Image (cartoon, rainbow, N blue to C red):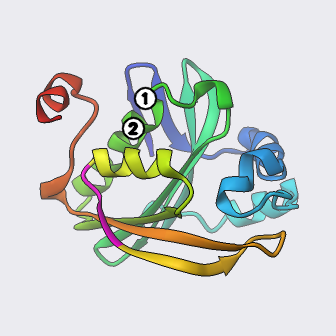
Amino acid sequence: MNISFENITIRNTEDRDIDQLVKWWNDGSVMAHAGFPLGLGTTAEKVRADLKSDSDDTRRRLVLEHEGKLIGEMNYHVLDEKAEIGIKICDFSCQEKGIGRKALSMLISALFDRGIREIVLDTNLANKRAQHVYESLGFRKLRVNIDSWQDQLGRMQSSVDYSLVPGDFIDYRNEKVNKEKE
């Protein structure tokens, strides 16, 4: 995948991205919201090996660029006509600027164009900012899973499951249309 809109690019992860991904994934401040306040403890070799199994048809790890600078990562995993997606804007200076909403619009549109009929994701119940973004894109809350998993520090965490179908999708690449919907 290699898609661009305005100053945002989503592309397949390449070898040149691995060191940055490892740095982010091992940084507890970046990974805390995902339940890894101590980071993942991964290596470049492991990431490189994992990337070898990526395929457009099954699973793809992607990087997110803004104005030519690597700022985060995205991914999708396909099961039949359903895809599970994820996004993480790792450069804190690029958060809360609308980049994530547009990047998600780009990825969601590309997946729907490929014939995906439903997109699912989950987020930490405490991550209200992410929930707001997902719901603004048309995702519907399916369920809240209270105390469903334990983070690295032994704290119980809760999550929210979301689903999106094409008819509910609000594409934030067209801000004028979306301002009218709000």
From this viewpoint, which residue is outermost toward the bottom? 148
The residue singled out by tag 2 in the image is 101
Q: Which residues are magenta?
A: 138-142
Which secondary structure, mark 1? loop
Near-viewer residue (146 or 161): 146
Residue 121 in view here: yes
Residue type (three-letter) at the residue carrying disc 2: Arg
Residue 142 on image: x %, y %:
32, 73
Residue 27 on image: x %, y %:
83, 47
**Residue drawn at (48%, 25%) of the image:** 97
**Residue drawn at (84%, 52%) of the image:** 26
Q: Is residue 51 above or below residue 157?
A: above
Q: Is residue 142 above or below residue 171?
A: below
Q: CA distance from mark 2 to mark 1?
A: 5 Å
Near-viewer residue (104 or 146): 146
**Residue drawn at (49%, 50%) of the image:** 128
Count of marks, rendered view:
2
Residue type (three-letter) at the residue carrying disc 1: Gly
Asked if the residue under mark 1 is in contact with the one under mark 2, i.e. CB atoms within 8 Å, the reply is yes
Q: Is residue 149 left or right of residue 181?
A: right
- Tell me which secondary structure the magenta stretch mostly adopts: strand
Near-viewer residue (43 or 96): 96
Label 2 neighbour load within 10 Å: few <14, some 14-19, many 20+: some
Label 1 neighbour load within 10 Å: few <14, some 14-19, many 20+: few
Which secondary structure, mark 2? helix
Q: Quadrant of residue 66?
A: top right
Residue 58 in view here: no
The residue singled out by tag 1 in the image is 98
**Residue drawn at (77%, 52%) of the image:** 25
Q: Quadrant of the C terminus?
A: top left
